[in-house]
Image (spheres, rainbow, N blue to C red):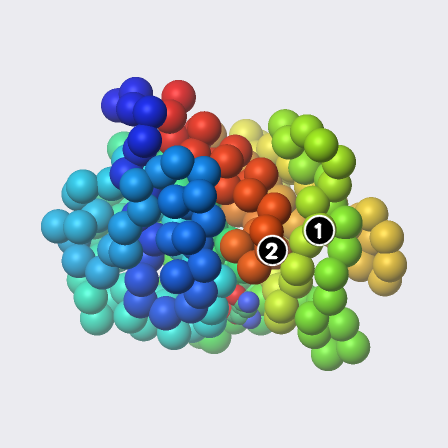
């Protein structure tokens, strides 16, 4: 892996909150670029898969012929961070998904789509993340998945600490792959993006 001070980090720009991730990544010192083509993917040191709608992202990944190139880069160790729909795209197994949706060859985990249910479709909660100092993140959840099961080698980084969803796993890491149920790109707290950029730099 290249060791660079301002790594080039792509944001998969097919659907979802692409702009917010580009801004957050730029603010923490990365060279942030949208990725829609395989040639653009070739040029990145890390990739973010944004929140949005995983069923739509899954379809567009095939239309833009990015599935195989992304799977190959993941297998070769590319650092990837997925938030919300991006977490779903990084999960090896999805519950309550559409039968035709497919993720990448990513984290050994099972996630449940739209897991928090209608009552708590969108909510905010403090989440303490292992490896991130300075107190809990103010996490924003929007029709979010949670992690139901993790395989060997997956580190649980964060769980919900209060409310009806207390104890639910919402942040994980497996090697160079990082995923959160929530959307740090929608807050002004840049610590999660800084954590990912540091992961890309090492
Ligand atoms: N519910 C969405 C999905 O299934 C994810 C929502 C989000 O990314 N905010 O992809």
Is residue 18 or residue 104 the one in the foreground?
A: 18
Write the residue at 78% across / 77% down. Answer: 119
Q: Position of residue 49 (x, y in %)?
A: 40, 54
Question: Can residue 110 be seen from the camera position used here?
Answer: no
Which label's residue is closer to the chain start, 2 or 1? Answer: 1
62 versus 139 height, above or below: below
- Secondary structure of the residue carrying tag 1 is strand
Q: Image point 22% across, 60% down: which residue?
A: 36
| Position in image of residue 189 (x %, y %) | 61, 46
Q: What is the number of the mark on residue 113? A: none
Query: Image height check: is 161 above or below 97?
Result: above
Circle 2 Cα neighbour tier, 10 Å, few/some/many (<14 / 14–19 / ≥20): few
Q: Which residue is mark 2?
A: 187
Label 2, label 1: how many angstroms apart (C-alpha)? Answer: 8 Å
Mark 1 closeness class: few <14, some 14–19, many ≥20 residues within 10 Å = some
In the displayed structure image, the side of residue 192 where residue 24 appears, left or right = left
Q: Is residue 145 left or right of residue 193?
A: right
Q: Is residue 44 left or right of residue 28?
A: left
Displayed quadrant of residue 200 = top left
- Quarter of the image for the N terminus: give it: top left
> Residue 152: x, y in percent?
57, 32
Q: Residue furthest bottom?
A: 118
For the point 76% across and 72% down, which residue is it?
120
Disc 2 to disc 1: CB gap under 8 Å: yes
What number is the disc on residue 138?
A: 1
Near-viewer residue (130 or 31): 31
**Front position in the image: 10 or 113:** 10
């Amino acid at each position: 892996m290249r060791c660079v001070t301002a790594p080039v980090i792509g944001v998969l720009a097919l659907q979802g909150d692409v702009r917010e991730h580009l801004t957050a990544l730029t603010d923490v010192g990365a060279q942030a670029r949208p990725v829609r083509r395989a040639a653009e993917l070739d040029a990145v040191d890390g990739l973010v898969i944004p929140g949005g709608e995983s069923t739509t992202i899954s379809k567009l990944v095939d239309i833009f012929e990015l599935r195989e190139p992304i799977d190959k880069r993941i297998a070769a160790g590319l650092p990837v961070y997925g938030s919300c729909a991006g977490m779903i795209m990084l999960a090896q197994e999805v519950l309550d998904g559409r039968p035709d949706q497919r993720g990448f060859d990513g984290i050994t985990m099972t996630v449940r789509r739209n897991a928090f249910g209608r009552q708590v479709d969108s909510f905010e909660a403090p989440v303490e993340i292992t490896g991130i100092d300075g107190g809990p993140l103010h996490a924003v959840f929007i029709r979010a998945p949670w992690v139901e099961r993790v395989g060997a080698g997956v580190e649980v980084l964060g769980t919900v600490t209060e409310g009806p969803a207390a104890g639910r796993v919402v942040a994980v890491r497996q090697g160079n792959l990082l995923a959160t149920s929530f959307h740090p790109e929608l807050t002004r707290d840049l610590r999660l993006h800084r954590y990912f950029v540091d992961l890309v730099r090492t």
